[in-house]
Image: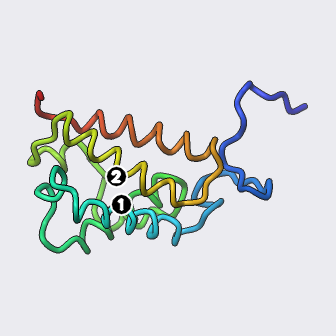
Amino acid sequence: MNVPLGREHPWVDVTGRGADTLYDLVGPEWFVALVDRFYDGVATNPVLRSLYPDDLEGPRHRLAGFLQQYWGGPAEYSAERGHPRLRMRHEPFRIGEAEREAWLRSMAAALVGGGLTAPAETKVMEYFAGAASHLVNHPS
């Protein structure tokens, strides 16, 4: 017997097709497109731009790989970079509440263009909000 637990399964597309993971639902190119939209915003954001190198190709590749792995794809990110250690990798950068909020706004704008259902979009944004809060390392 399959008893619902009160929350809609988030990994369902607009046609009703379900998947076990977000990666299975959208495939690897969805993450590349998400990251491209995100970094297009970073490139013009005065709060975020100084946190990144001049060439954004490396960060684009790493974020797409990390997100693909995190959301159920192959472990290529870990094969290339080892354990994600997100807090340690971001420690050299001053990340306060302003940076957190700017990052979340940019990621939310990128996510809106991804064509996810509302439950899937909510689940992904919940993750991004928690991750962004975890990386704050400087009091405002």
Residue at mark 2 = 106
Give x and y (percent) for residue 48: 19, 53
Q: Type of residue at label 2? A: Ser
Residue sitting nearer the eye, 30 or 48: 48
Q: Nearer the viewer, residue 111 or 76?
A: 111
- Asked where in the image residue 131 lies, by quadrant, the reply is top left
The location of residue 79, given as percent across then percent down, is 36, 66
Q: Which mark is residue 70?
A: none
Side of 122 relative to 110 (left or right): right
Residue type, numbered disc 1: Phe
Looking at the rendering, in which quadrant would you find the N terminus? top right
User: What residue is drawn where x is 17% and y is 74%?
Assistant: 55
Answer with left or right where residue 120 lies relative to residue 13.
left
How packed mark 1 is, by other alpha carbons closer than 10 Å (few <14, some 14-19, many 20 or more), is many
Query: Of the numbered discs in the image, which one, if any, rests on residue 38?
Result: 1
Could you tell me which residue is drawn at 52 percent across and 72 percent down? 29
Callout 2 touching callout 1 (CB < 8 Å): yes
Q: Please identify the quadrant where the C terminus is shown.
A: top left
- Residue 22: x and y in percent read 59, 54
Q: Is residue 3 above or below residue 127?
A: above
Which of the two labelled residues, at mark 2 and mark 1, occupies the earlier sequence position? 1
